[in-house]
Amino acid sequence: MPHVDVYTMIIAGCGMVILSYFFSVINKATRIPSVLLLLATGIGIRYGLQMMDVAFMVPPLAVEFLGTLGLIMIVLEAGLDLEVRRDKLGLIRGSFFSALVILLVSSLGVAGILFWWLPDTSFMQCLVYAISLCVVSSAIVLPSVHHLSPLKKEFLVYEASFSDVIGIMAFNFLTAGTAITVQSTAWFFGSIPVALVLSLVVCFGLMMLLVKNRINVKFFLVFAVLILVYVGGKKMALPSLLTVLIFGMVVNNWEWVTWPPLKRYFSDESVDDTAAFLKSITAESAFLIRTFFFVLFGMNIDLVFLQNPQVWQLGSLIVAALLVLRFIYLRILHRYDLFPELFYIPRGLITVLLFYKIPEWQRIDAFDEGVLFFVILATNLIMMLGSMLYRDVPVELHEPSPQPTDS
């Protein structure tokens, strides 16, 4: 293996960031998801190194580490984008139930397919795998909705964010112990109000760091505190991802806070200025982490799985189930329009992160990792197709022009 010095690594890292920026430009111009281009870059690097007889392996721990950081940044970014107003309560409620019902039904459906397809497995094992395959990736949805109408954009952003949080909570519940008991169930549901109270305490503590801190270095201090809260909550089996989401929403919707002492201590103007800068820093950090995560994950993908007909067959069954079940639900909820919401089913960062977190005692030896790669690539290609076919101003949404009247 040739010697790789520090300067070569710096050049490679900077090159990936620059390339990722151009992929974002390409995404806006062509609607090809930048994530697909990053994965293709990683796959290309893998096979380029193989052609040069360079042995290189990306440790799963590195992918999991970047995935965890990316998850926190992406959920925070989503929270900072979500506006809670009275006229949007119906949209928020609809997107929440869309995420909840579609995730529940899809997980049961995919678990049934895995249970039928794979021998010597329990339904609970299959359900754990199914949840990781059924969570919509907000890391991919958020950068891919810029060209949609405001209503569609907000619906998909809310839905993907809720899908992340609900999916991770359900996954943590199913993998917390070897058996689901009354005590574990009670702790799971009881931990939600505990997490909400913790979220409020953390929110106002972080607000003090942001608004009242006179030291210039404060935004990455806030990130460090959020990461510690998330990891600490995970250790105590608390849904701490809620804390990250709620913090972002509180900062972005400070006008809803009406308690006079808080309003005097944190003025709307100071919070708005801080929120604008925090959004910028969070978006930049999420972009950076997302870049390295998907390139490194792409380097882990071996295209040999495409030669395995079992991977094609099982992967196609799973993707078809995801589309059909989403179609059925959206058809009931949005009778007038299914496009392009039906196609926004990308799997990505959360799916990979949860897959690597499946405990050893719940692993299915017969499950081919190629199915994971197939589902991720196929769902992103489906989203790309829907995005390309969508017109910015759909004809069916045009309002009729007022007709002139005779005076």
Image (spheres, grey):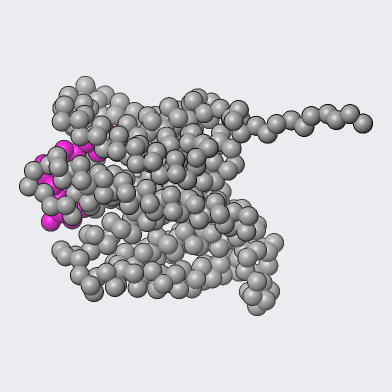
Task: Classify 270 as above or below 24.
Answer: below
Task: Classify 273 as above or below 195.
Answer: above
Q: Nearer the viewer, residue 2 or 65?
A: 65
Left or right: 269, with 92 as reference point: right
Residue 169: x %, y % from top left:
33, 59
Examine the rendering and report whether any part of residue 214 can be seen.
no
Residue drawn where x is 51% and y is 36% of the image: 337
Magenta segment: does it hold 368? yes
- Find the residue positioned furthest to the front: 406
Left or right: 183, with 286 as reference point: left
- Find the residue positioned furthest to the right: 407
Residue 338: x %, y % from top left:
48, 36
Residue 37: x %, y % from top left:
39, 29
Task: Classify 167 as above or below 264.
Answer: above
Residue drawn where x is 35% and y is 36% of the image: 323
Left or right: 348, with 313 as reference point: right
Residue 27: x %, y % from top left:
49, 30
Q: Quadrant of the N terminus?
A: top left
Examine the rendering and report whether any part of residue 123 can be seen.
yes
Q: Nearer the viewer, residue 353 or 216?
A: 353
- Find the residue positioned furthest to the top: 51
Residue drawn where x is 50% and y is 42% of the image: 334
Task: Classify 353 as above or below 257.
Answer: above
Picture quadrant of residue 241: bottom left
Q: Nearer the viewer, residue 200 or 14?
A: 200
Residue drawn where x is 29% and y is 29% of the image: 43
- Find the residue positioned furthest to the left: 120
Residue range (magenta):
358-374
Q: Quadrant of the C terminus?
A: top right
